Image: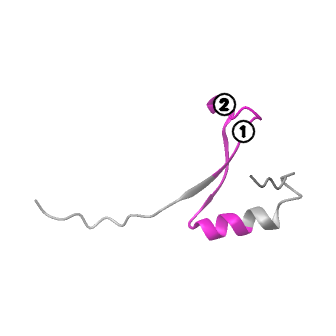
Amino acid sequence: MAASNRIKAEMYILFSCNAWHEYSSFEPKAVFSSIEKAADFLQKNRRKLKLEVSIR
């Protein structure tokens, strides 16, 4: 068999959901090419997205 020449790309998808994390409530909000870009977006838009910091 010939080797595939396809390029594999990772994607990180930002979802919103309800407080119970039910799958039916998941809504995609944005797609990122790296985890760093996703984290940067979340940090810059924390107030706009009404995010709370939770340390466990």
Q: Indicate whether residue 5 is drawn in magenta.
A: no
Q: Say few, some or many: other residues with alpha carbon within 10 Å of mark 2 (under 14 / 14 to 19 / 20 or more).
A: few
Q: Which mark is residue 9?
A: none
Q: Residue at x 38, y 64 (%)?
A: 8
Q: Residue at x 83, y 52 (%)?
A: 51
On screen, residue 7 versus residue 3, left or right, reads right
Disc 1 marks a residue whose amino acid type is Cys
Task: State yes or no: discs 1 and 2 in contact (Cβ < 8 Å).
Answer: yes
Mark 1 lies on a secondary structure that is loop
Give percent across and percent down for residue 45.
82, 62
Q: Give the range drawn in magenta.
A: 14-40
- Between 53 and 35, the one lying in front of the other is 53
Q: Residue at x 57, y 67 (%)?
A: 34
Estimate the spatial distance between the alpha carbons at disc 1 and disc 2, rounded to whole Å. Answer: 7 Å
Give percent across and percent down for residue 38.
66, 64
Give percent across and percent down for residue 9.
44, 64
On screen, residue 5 versus residue 32, left or right, reads left
Classify the position of the N terminus by image quarter.
bottom left
Q: Residue 22 carries which label?
A: 2
Residue where numbered disc 1 is placed: 17
35 shown above or below 30:
below
Disc 2 marks a residue whose amino acid type is Glu
Return the residue found at the far left: 1
On screen, residue 27 versus residue 6, left or right, reads right
Q: Indicate whether residue 39 is drawn in magenta.
A: yes
Mark 2 lies on a secondary structure that is loop
Image quadrant in which you'd find residue 20:
top right
Q: Which residue is drawn at 84% across and 60% down?
A: 46
Mark 1 or 2 closer to N-term? 1
- Between 46 and 8, the one lying in front of the other is 46
